[in-house]
Amino acid sequence: MTTISVIVPIYNAEKYLAKCIESLIQQSHTALQIILVNDGSTDQSLTIAEQYAQQDARIQLYSHPTNQGQSAARNLGLQHATGEFISFVDADDYVDNDFYVYMLHHIGNLDCVQIGYRRVTKQGKVLIQKLPRHFHQFTSPCMRLYRHEFFTQHHLSFPMGMIYEDVIFSLDFWATKPTYKMLPYTGYNYLANTNSTTATRNLVAKELLFATLKEKRQKSKNIAHRLLILYTIIRLKFHFKRYD
């Protein structure tokens, strides 16, 4: 059976972690390598992760003694991934039971498939259900299933020292020109968590993000990539203006 490595970075997610892990161990597709990376949590997240690792042999637990950021956690997970495909799930989110069955059915020989998501409350109420209009709309790595070989071939990883690392990662990923398909499916449930890292307003982090994007645009020699970076800058400015 085709194996999928699911990487879950964890930082102080004790309120949501059990639901996230339960959604993975209950998947219809059972050939999963569930990689939990505790990134220096100071709450009970590590204890919860340890309990699940003892119950399910598919779960592998790794831990940073101190918080190093989501990029470091995801990169550590990538180092231990052995599946034919790669998936990312955040510790305060959860996925539908047919999440991996559906994407595997459609990926074929492609490098990636991309889906939509639901934004949900803690009680499970759906606030928004969104499908991507085009491949470059969503920057979250969680809305995709990747072929592991493609990751390795292009030496893809997450940039360190940033909060909005997803944006830079996605631009680097798109620059590799993967073969892909967008699917009319919203099996990823994104928690509207006002305490999460990305939900917390951080002017310095945003300034660093835009400075990094502008630097990448100046260095890029590919016109299409430069235009994509410009599009991303404009879209993010509208996004921050709307939600700040």
Image (spheres, grey):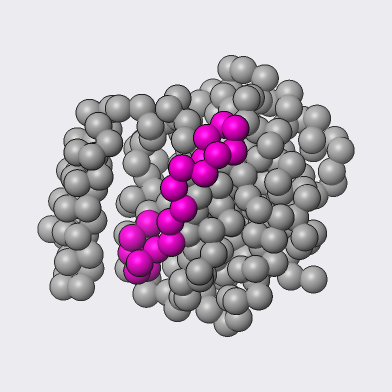
- Residue at x 53%, y 58% (from the top left corner): 186
Residue 78 lies left or right of residue 157; in this view the side is right
Instruction: Pick the quarter of the image with the N terminus.
Output: bottom right
Q: From this viewpoint, is residue 145 visible?
A: yes
Residue 63 percent coordinates (x, y): 64, 32
Residue 216 lies left or right of residue 186; in this view the side is left
Q: Is residue 54 above or below residue 128?
A: above
Most extreme residue toward the bottom is: 109
Q: Which region shows up in magenta?
A: 120-138
Q: Is residue 4 above or below residue 119?
A: below
Residue 134 percent coordinates (x, y): 34, 69
Residue 214 percent coordinates (x, y): 15, 51
Closer to us: 176 or 28? 28
Q: Is residue 78 above or below residue 154?
A: above
Q: Is residue 110 magenta?
A: no
Instruction: Pick the quarter of the image with the C terminus.
Output: top left
Most extreme residue toward the top is: 42
- Residue at x 18%, y 45% (from the top left corner): 237
Closer to us: 25 or 126? 126
Q: From this viewpoint, is residue 4 visible?
A: no
Dominant SS type (magenta): loop
Residue 58 lies left or right of residue 201; in this view the side is right
Q: Quadrant of residue 53?
A: top right
- Residue at x 50%, y 69% (from the top left corner): 184
Closer to us: 192 or 216? 192
